[in-house]
Amino acid sequence: MKVKLLSALNDTNVDATQTTNQRQLEISISAIADELDSSIPVNLCLILDKSGSMHGEAMNTVIQAVEQLLDQLKPGDRISIVAFAGTAEVIIPNQIVQDLKTIKTQLHKSLKAGGGTIIGEGLSLGITELLKGTKGAVSQAFLLTDGHGDNGLKIWKWQIGSNDNNRCLQLAQKATRLNITINTFGFGDDWNQDLLEKIADAGGGTLAYIETPNQAVDQFKRLFKRIQSVGLTNAHLLLSLVPGVRLAELKPVAQVAPETIELPVETEANGSFVIRLGDLMKDVERVVLGNIYLGQLPEGEQVIGHIQIRYDDPAQKKESLLSPLMPIYANITQTYQPALNTQVSQSILVLAKYRQTQIAEAKLEQGDRTGAVTMLQTAAKTALQIGDTNAATVLQSSATRLQAGQELSEADRKKTRIASKTILG
């Protein structure tokens, strides 16, 4: 398995007469399978909410979705299942899939709804189970909940009792360091979209919205197919820039595909940058945008930086492999004429749609309904520019509702968030 690495600037030509030029650097990364490469075993943990609100149709549908997912597991794959409510328990300990009938029987026996919602307990147990089978495998979790974590009680500046949401974020960051990806599923309308998005974003996972129970099977199937396509894991983008070229200080790097995520950047002692990407899928690109500034550089084609990917290859049981070092070029010219890259322009619009929606949400929280409407309308127009008509419909619908003096329902808010992060088509 090898890394495919490509880069492009939104405008390759740079005006030599300007003291500063801003450019967007697009980097696309994917895994390429050789003919002899075999599929990598999946090490999957299902972390399932069994609180009282999941009683009835919701729980029955989740069990159905789990059963269909179990049927897709291949010889050598590993499975574990954790259920949580007020406390958490391991229903199926981490094991190589052999006796599906027994696993399904235990699932029906143990997954009974009742109790509160302490997500962190389930997440902690799930990570522990996954750690039993990480060697030579793609380790991912499906975290499904229909509720909010317990915030405990805060009196002035003192926290009384544990804050489950804070613990969840700490656990998500721990999972990332252990090369575990967590995908989150919000079931119904009463779940914390900020929390589930942050958990998924922490390690390059996916946030999915199961609005009605009958969507559970399709959402599980969609994300499991993505896990099965992973070829390389624990990928990090290594970026170095020449003197006179720098990253923007505010939100310098973001992923725009397969979902939009703001990416944290770590700076090495030598001044280069490290950005964690997570798992790389075969023939499905992770696309990253870097916001860079170029000072005055000598005329002609210049190398303005280098990129490289550090990654693990589970099939070969090898870690910290490096792709070939790739230079980034810009053409510094005294007679500037734009040389725009349409693909990078599209990626810039994808990121703009996400950030415009974020601003709209912030304005709505501040009570600025007019400002929220304006930004949602702008995001809807941006979605149309990139051909994302379904997202445009969702965003415009939310804007229209606010403009008419109505409140956004929980379902409206969640659809808006998903539309901002994903190309709905």
Image (cartoon, helix red, strand yellow):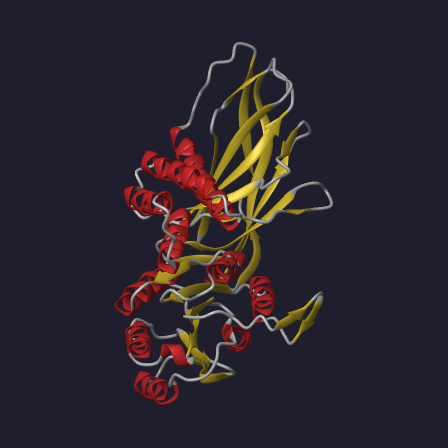
* Rendering quarter of residue 245: top right
Judged from this view, the residue extending furthest toward the right is: 269
From the viewer's side, name the closer residue of 396 and 177: 396
Where does the image place residue 87, in percent across and percent down from the top left? 52, 83
Where does the image place residue 383, in percent across and percent down from the top left? 35, 39
From the viewer's side, name the closer residue of 389 and 8: 389
Where does the image place residue 424, in percent across and percent down from the top left? 32, 48
* Rendering quarter of residue 145: bottom left
From the viewer's side, name the closer residue of 285 and 318: 285
**Residue at 46% from the left image edge and 18% from the top image edge:** 338
Q: Please say whether residue 33 is visible from this viewpoint.
A: no
Where does the image place residue 64, in percent across and percent down from the top left? 28, 76
Q: Please say whether residue 252 is visible from this viewpoint.
A: yes
From the viewer's side, name the closer residue of 124 and 366: 366
**Residue at 55% from the left image edge and 48% from the top image edge:** 263
**Residue at 31% from the left image edge and 46% from the top image edge:** 397
Q: Say left or right for 219 vs 19.
A: left
Which quadrant: the C terminus?
Answer: top left
